[in-house]
Image: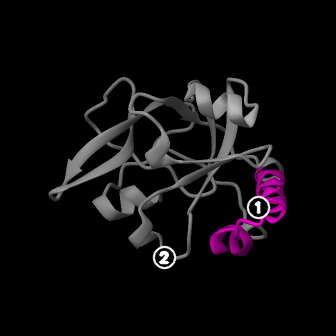
Amino acid sequence: MCAGSVAAGIETKAREGQALMVADFGVMGHRHRLFAPVANPTCPVCIDFNSTVMFATLPAHFRETNQITLPAKAVMISPDVNFHQSRNDVFVFENGARIQLSQLPVGTNLKVVEADVVFAQRVIAAANAKASRTATPTPQSVRERSDELVPVHVG
């Protein structure tokens, strides 16, 4: 499950193909950036780790800086092994570009698409290569999970 959902106790999972949006929710006295169905934006849902998603919208500066065109496919990963503390999921694109859930504006549109292990492995490899070129340490979970990817079926 996504880190924010774990922290907030959300158990409802997004369905494959369901139109989602990024939304802020107040849960147990804390603000959590989570996902909600476009058709029911008051009901938070979870996206599983290693799920493949398709973004319909992304911030213009992020698209331009990272040469990403819409719609854009990405894989959602945990930023570190101790995701209960970080609570900030990361989306990795095929070219290795990353964006944290907290950096996505409320209202960003996406959907979970059919699991694609080959795509996910390619994305993780690109992220690791980009991180090594920029001398930015790759989060440990990316290295640990890169050979553990399995199809995730939602719903």
Q: Decide whether the magenta segment is chiefly helix, strand or loop.
A: helix
**In this view, 12 is above or below 19:** below
Q: Residues within 10 Å of mark 2 (few under 14, many from 20)?
A: few
Residue 63 lies left or right of residue 30; in this view the side is right
* Dot 2 and dot 1 residues touching (CB under 8 Å): no
| Of residues 12 and 36, the one drawn nearer to the viewer in this rendering | 36
Q: In which quarter of the image is residue 140?
A: bottom right
Q: Residues within 10 Å of mark 1 (few under 14, many from 20)?
A: some
Residue mark closest to the camera, 2 vs 1:
1
Label number found at residue 14? none
Residue at 48% across / 76% down in the picture? 82
**In this view, 99 is above or below 28:** above
What secondary structure is marked by label 2? loop
The picture places residue 31, in percent across and down from the top left corner, at 25, 51
The picture places residue 9, in percent across and down from the top left corner, at 29, 61
Sequence-first disc among 2 and 1: 2
Residue at 31% across / 28% down in the picture? 40
Residue at 32% across / 55% down in the picture? 10
Residue range highlighted in magenta = 120-145
Mark 2 and mark 1: Cα distance apart in space: 20 Å
| Residue 138 inside the magenta-drawn segment | yes
Disc 2: which residue: 82
User: What residue type is disc 2 on?
Assistant: Asn
Q: Quadrant of residue 50?
A: bottom right
Residue at 36% across / 23% down in the picture? 39
Disc 1: which residue: 131
